[in-house]
Amino acid sequence: MPVATLLPFTATPNRKSASPTSFRLTEKFILLLVFSAFITLCFGAIFFLPDSSKLLSGVFFHSSAVETNTHTGPDSSDAGSAGNDDRLLAKIKKDHEKALLEAKDTLQKLPDVIQNDILADKAKVTKESMGKGAKDGNNLPFIEYHRPPGATGLEPQDPETRERRAKIKEMMKHAWDSYKQYAWGSNELRPVSKHGHSSNLFGSIKGATIVDALDTLYIMEMFEEFDAATDWVEKSLDFNVNAEVSVFEVNIRFVGGLLSAYYLSGKEVFRRKAVELGEKLLPAFKTPTGIPWALLNLKSGIGRNWPWASGGSSILAEYGTLHLEFMHLSRLSGNPEFAQKVMNIRKVLNRLEKPQGLYPNYLNPNSGQWGQHHVSVGGLGDSFYEYLLKAWLMSDKTDEEGKKMYYDALQAIETNLMRKSTNGLTYIAEWKGGLLEHKMGHLTCFAGGMIALGADGAPGDKTGHQMEQAAEIARTCHESYARTTLKLGPEAFRFDGGVEAIATRQNEKYFILRPEVIETYMYMWRFTHDPKYREWGWEAVQALEQHCRVDGGYSGVRDVYASSPNYDDVQQSFYLAETLKYLYLLFSEDDHLPFEHWVFNTEAHPLPVIRKDKTDRPNEVE
Ligand code: DMJ
């Protein structure tokens, strides 16, 4: 059969048109068969198209790329369009393959590596935003604020404790109102002569009491006072001063106070001010070793050390007490420089040989060598050890280096400095070039609380042993109060010449409203719930009320062995920041500023634990 007979629509020379009526039945059947096969083929083709939304969008819809190419330029000819389509398809295919390869790579990575990649990308973005002008604390990266748990606490169940706690709040009100009335805006109050007082530790920065007291006002729920203090910070706290300040004091009181106020209240002004001040402190690190100067002119950025410090040395307790605040400054500003500076201090220390494993109090920032070999857990050394332990706790126990440095140092202290008196009082002596001076400072009494706080993580099976040491130090420090006439502790007490826990030198008999003994009671109470710690705290409250309270606030006294107080006429800012705060917490429930969420800086300013698994929310702890 010729093909022509099978194709009725094929024109033949002799036939002008072909009418369906003229087909035979078999022809009609073949025609129907061919037609339905054609329809089936077209319809089926749709299902064999590639399964890609990208490709489909190019086929069924006009993507913007297709649109652009078909309407512009010399390529809009038919031939050009065809070339364009090929290039487009090739590009789409390439992108598709690249995306598949990346996804495959990602799937093969460990979760940790993926997490690190995310962190690196985030740091890059933050750094770029910092580069766009976040240098003055005014242009900080956005942070969603989440208040950590326990910022305020419930009333204690027990009526006596409730009453005592209310009494401490009343004391805070008296201290604050007096400052407000007689010294508002000055650094501290002279409660007897009733006017302002400024120590040169803060240069011409003003308002130390306001910034130091902010968090105490907040946790005691004195919100009206807190708002007045916030208003002052907003309008009057000024760091643009041409004056020399103590880097350590400004850091622990101002930076620490502002950071705590931010974490408790969420008010941006505190974050901004803390970062602004932190930036101003950075030039202190411009030394050959990166060990910071003790003193810094905030305007010129020129630093120097205390003239009395062994051969121009920096002081262990000063350069070693920046870590907690600077880690938080990096988290809140997105600027890694703060953290880098304090991590470098550790590097320098870890390269040095330590006599008997001990850290001398003096280190030369130019040579990187120790100065005089004087070791103390009191003044000049104290909070360095505290910050090693707390750096580990604040890092959610990830800072293994801080942990190791702390427990190694504590072991060396136990071996070389800790002693028991004839009548069984444990004390921590001072070490001068291998010789012991059997004296313990009021400042050293914080060590009871520190050792208790670290006991749980102690290596080996030393937890119980360290808790005992902490309890013994608390007892010794209580004795130093109990053996005075005013029932307040002397600045330093001795264990030689036939005395135990008593000050023998006139210039060591004063009490300046310091917190360390009460701080240790507070930690011991939280860890043991032994009622004696609350009783000892209450004894101190009664002595403060009887001998330090005056009409215009609270004053230190010159001699705790005298029969009546001789006032020094200073209400220290740390009385509001630390002494009254630790007393209040001693009579509060444990879920108020709980230790698993908060770490106190050395001025008792609470800073939240930085959770290792909450990388995107620096101030959220739960
Ligand atoms: C406070 O400023 C801090 O506790 C510091 O670490 C040492 N001493 C005073 C209070 O005594």
Image: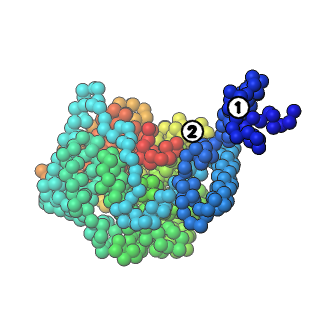
User: Which residue appears at 38% of the width and 71% of the height?
Assistant: 296
Kindly tell me whether residue 319 is visible in this rendering.
Answer: no
Mark 2 Cα shell of 10 Å, populated few (<14), some (14-19), many (≥20): few
Residue 132 on image: x %, y %: 43, 66
Question: In this view of the protein, can residue 584 be seen by the observer?
Answer: yes
Q: Residue 575's mark?
A: none
**Residue drawn 45% across the image and 61% down it:** 129
Residue 249: image quadrant is bottom left
Residues 611 and 39: in front is: 39
Q: Residue furthest right?
A: 1
Quote the CA–CA distance across marks 1 and 2. Answer: 93 Å
Q: Secondary structure at mark 2?
A: loop
At x 35%, y 30%, the residue is 531
- Residue 507 position within the rendered picture, expressed as x and y whole percent measured from the top left: 31, 61
Assign the N terminus to one quadrant of the image.
Answer: top right
Q: Residue 487, percent across and down?
A: 27, 44
Quadrant housing residue 152: top left
The residue carrying mark 2 is 462
Q: Amino acid at mark 2?
A: Lys
Q: Residue at x 13, y 55 (%)?
A: 181
Please report whichever mark, 1 or 2, sits nearer to the chain's N-terminal start: 1
Indicate left or right for 43 with 387 as reference: right
The residue type indicated by label 1 comes to: Phe
Q: Residues within 10 Å of mark 1 (few under 14, many from 20)?
A: few
Instruction: Say which of marks 1 and 2 sits in front.
Output: 1
Residue position for label 1? 35
